Image (cartoon, rainbow, N blue to C red):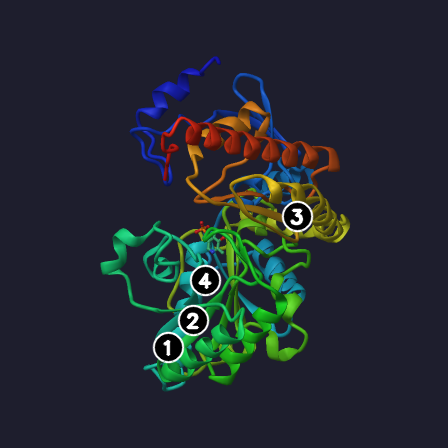
């Protein structure tokens, strides 16, 4: 494969995410993208099955988003958001408030998911301070949760999943609980909340699907139960919809699936990833009216003390407004539901492949959990050879394609996944035959 000059030169200077730089396979150079396809420097095309870390809901280079960003670039690429404001941000805030359930209506913009969760935590803690209960300062989170890479958010990620254990000694200590998926676990969560409620500011959950912690899925009933218990103990409920928001689970927001009455509306919701249609960094923390109201008063000290330099960047807000146009004009939710049916159908056969522990589908997300040693290197190498872009992590291989993907393209993805799982099963059994232990890799 021909390697462009910038690749070899730049690889001497770049530091890649979650990567052992001594041994990693070099990343693939991408030169352009359109629809569900990524074009590599050597001319090959890959069908993308994971939407660039779950962002590219309309596929790549959608002309409507491109035009909106280009127009915004001509007019006002950036301006600070203190003392000054602009139409793209205010229009976006108005539209998000209208789309979100209940009175989730106050929007605070940031530039990344992690920071939007940090802001949600600040809101929750200061909410209680402003209400005269500063001792309510701890956060309850769930096993397999993932809420970001910054220090406060690392403290809310599954402690056993390994991404952040190195920093455990310098993170705030929060309270981990199990999702109430059985009567025993339900009682356990109720007990945790009853025991600590005077010190709990909020409960944080990724509704319906826990993403980076292993693509674990739970039912709307479990989510409702979490909301109910949080409410019972007067804890704020933060829904981290950074991954699930914007149609991914088959409704515009995953919380909607559980929001059958006002009782289930989260107090704070975090959005990012697909917010700008996968084009520019943008995140939003949206609070219900009663949360916002707790910050009002004559005392300037009651105000929310946060303000990222690039908050509400006009280009990113223009992209997000264009993305919302597409959700209005095109049948994205129906597309997510169609993807879901196809994933149910085409991944079912994976259940019988040796080394497959579980196949899960919710909305436009399909996950295959593997048992036994996982040779991530082998899988990550094979997918591009088969013309697809999939990137398993831990012990899960998953599909989270752009919502615009065609049935034929999706079939290519599920076929590639099925084939690689068969190859893996064959490798493992060959390795066992020759009495060697199979290759392991983190
Ligand atoms: C990706 C993600 C985050 C972190 O977002 P970044 O933009 O990477 O900081 C937080 N929570 C969830 C559920 C996510 O999927």
Q: Is residue 162 left or right of residue 363?
A: left
Which image quadrant is residue 389 in? top right
Q: In this view, does 75 lie to the left or right of 308?
A: right
The residue at the far bottom in this view is 132
Question: Mark 3 = which residue?
Answer: 322
Gap in Å between the C-alphas at discs 1 and 2? 15 Å
Label 3 residue near ligand 1, CB within 8 Å: no
Going from N to C along the chain, the mark reached first, 1 or 4, is 4
Question: Mark 4 = which residue?
Answer: 83
Question: Mark 1 = which residue?
Answer: 300
Question: Mark 2 = which residue?
Answer: 123
Gap in Å between the C-alphas at discs 3 and 2? 28 Å
Tag 1–tag 2 contact (CB < 8 Å): no
Q: In this view, does 133 lie to the left or right of 94?
A: left
In front: mark 3 or mark 2? 2
Figure quadrant of the C terminus:
top left
Does residue 389 appear in this view?
no
């Amino acid at each position: 494969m021909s390697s462009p000059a910038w690749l070899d030169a730049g690889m001497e200077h770049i530091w890649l995410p979650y990567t052992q730089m001594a041994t990693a396979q070099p990343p693939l150079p991408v030169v352009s993208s359109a629809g569900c396809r990524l074009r590599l420097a050597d001319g090959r095309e890959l069908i993308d099955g994971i939407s660039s870390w779950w962002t590219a809901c309309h596929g790549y280079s959608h002309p409507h988003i491109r035009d909106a960003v280009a127009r915004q670039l001509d007019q006002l690429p950036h301006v600070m958001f203190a003392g000054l404001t602009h139409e793209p941000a205010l229009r976006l805030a108005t539209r998000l408030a209208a789309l979100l359930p209940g009175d989730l209506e106050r929007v605070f913009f940031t530039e990344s998911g992690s920071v939007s969760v940090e802001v949600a935590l600040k809101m929750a803690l200061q909410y209680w301070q402003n209400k005269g209960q500063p001792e309510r300062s701890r956060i309850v989170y769930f096993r397999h949760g993932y809420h970001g890479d910054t220090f406060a958010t690392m403290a809310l990620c599954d402690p056993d999943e390994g991404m952040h254990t190195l920093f455990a000694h310098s993170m705030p200590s929060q309270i981990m609980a199990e999702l109430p998926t059985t009567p025993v676990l339900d009682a356990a969560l109720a007990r945790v909340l009853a025991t600590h409620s005077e010190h709990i500011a909020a409960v944080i959950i990724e509704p319906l699907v826990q993403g980076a912690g292993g693509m674990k899925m739970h039912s709307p009933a479990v989510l409702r139960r979490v909301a109910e218990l949080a409410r019972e103990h007067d804890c704020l409920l933060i829904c981290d919809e950074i991954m699930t928001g914007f149609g991914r689970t088959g409704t515009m927001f995953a919380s909607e699936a559980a929001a059958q009455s006002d009782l289930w509306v989260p107090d704070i919701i975090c959005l990012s990833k697909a917010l700008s249609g996968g084009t520019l960094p943008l995140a939003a923390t949206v609070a219900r009216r009663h949360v916002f109201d707790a910050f009002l008063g004559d005392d300037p000290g009651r105000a929310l003390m946060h303000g990222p330099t690039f908050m509400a960047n006009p280009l990113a807000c223009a992209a997000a407004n264009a993305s919302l146009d597409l959700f209005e004009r095109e049948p994205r939710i129906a597309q997510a539901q169609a993807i879901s049916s196809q994933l149910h159908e085409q991944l079912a056969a994976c259940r019988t492949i040796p080394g497959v522990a579980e196949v899960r589908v919710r909305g436009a997300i399909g996950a295959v959990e593997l048992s036994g040693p996982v040779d991530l290197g082998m899988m990550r190498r094979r997918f591009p050879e088969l013309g697809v872009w999939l990137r398993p992590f831990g012990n899960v291989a998953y599909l989270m394609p752009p919502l615009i993907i065609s049935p034929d393209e999706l079939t290519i993805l599920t076929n590639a996944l099925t084939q690689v799982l068969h190859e893996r099963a064959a490798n493992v059994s060959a390795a066992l035959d020759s009495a060697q232990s199979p290759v392991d890799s983190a």
